[in-house]
Amino acid sequence: MNATFKRRAAQAGAALLAVGLAAGISGCRDSRAAAVDSAAEPEINIIVGGLEKVIYMPAKLSESLGYFEKEGVKVNLLGEQSGATAENALLTGSAQAVVGFYDHTIDLAAKNQCLTSVVQLANIPGEAEVVAASKADTIKSPADFEGKNLGITSLGSSTDFLTQALAGQAGVKNYTPAKVGAGQTFIAAIDNNGIDAGMTTDPTIAQLTESGKGKVLTEMRTEEGTRKALGGLYPAASVYMACDFVQKNPKTVQKLANAFVQTLRYINDHSAAEIAAKMPKEYANGGQALYEKSIKDTKTMFNRDGVIDPEGAKNVLRILDSYSSNVKGKGGSIDLSKTYTTEFVSKVPAQ
């Protein structure tokens, strides 16, 4: 039994446990869901798969700009380093929304759980596979992943799904996925030779490339790079929620959609320096100039209107059905129309 198989088995067990927990407290979650829309000031817990990551910047920026408050909804932003952990919080009812990758809605649909993206923040991943500078001469493409240690945030995360896709498309079957998180823990793994390459985001990408410690191997922060790497668009950063919560609390969901779309418009209309000035100072731990660069390198990924690309959604399903151990073989039974909705973003008032 190789290392990859062992890790996948552990991942599957964790997923089953999460689903079991969700089923066990469904009555409690339903009761909580029914009460939110009727509150004078709805309160929502949003799990963010890495508050400091530029790809999830709209969450903290919405708060900083006062858009949640303007909409009359109290939002508690709770940071997690992995989308897999975030989706478990949603399933168990400790959070009502997640800012994370759209592909989790498909991954959970394969386990008969209904999650739906209500605001699509981006139609590309905003990620890159970064190779350690010391390994750049031997790892020149995903075809060279065979036998290598590849960094991901955690098993079952979107970085895991994307790594499986890149390896699978290149015909690579044996590599070791290494849970190294993001930010400083990812950089430390590069420094200590714990990983040969890994999937990560800005500002980590900017810190590695500017310091000379890493080089971008596969670029997915642009539409061109994403199409080249994945054969089409790949809707990624989104605001997703449990379907039953959305159905029972349309007023609250609309408030969230209004706030996030206003933030997307702000991102599209302002410079990286102006955006950085609105973010917490501690997010610029590599220096303000480097943080502004990381925003500039990534900000073009964000949608303006929060609408998902339908063909991109089909591409996500195709990729997961082909290469994800969770979804493979189940794609034909997944109703893609339940994994996202444009109902709320279409009603956001004009600027």
Image (cartoon, rainbow, N blue to C red):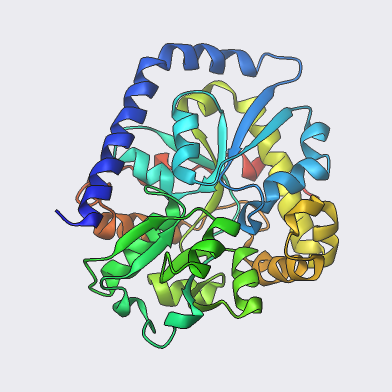
Q: Is residue 201 left or right of residue 297?
A: left
Residue 279 can be seen in this image: no
Q: Can you see residue 114?
A: yes
Q: Residue at x 37, y 47 (%)?
A: 156
Q: Quadrant of residue 317?
A: bottom left
Residue 256 image position (x, y, % from top left): 68, 36
- Residue 63 rendering spot, x and y as whole percentages: 77, 40
The answer to whether residue 230 is above or below residue 234 is below
Q: Residue at x 23, y 44 (%)?
A: 9
Which quarter of the picture shows residue 95? Answer: top right
- On screen, residue 79 above or below 26: below
Question: In screen coordinates, is 144 left or right of 183?
Answer: left
Name the residue rendered at 37%, 81% in the picture: 141
**Camera-side residue of 184 and 163:** 184
Q: Residue furthest left?
A: 1
Q: Residue furthest front?
A: 192
Number of numbered markers:
0
Q: Quadrant of residue 135?
A: bottom left
Q: Is residue 259 above or below residue 278?
A: above
Q: Residue at x 67, y 72 (%)?
A: 297
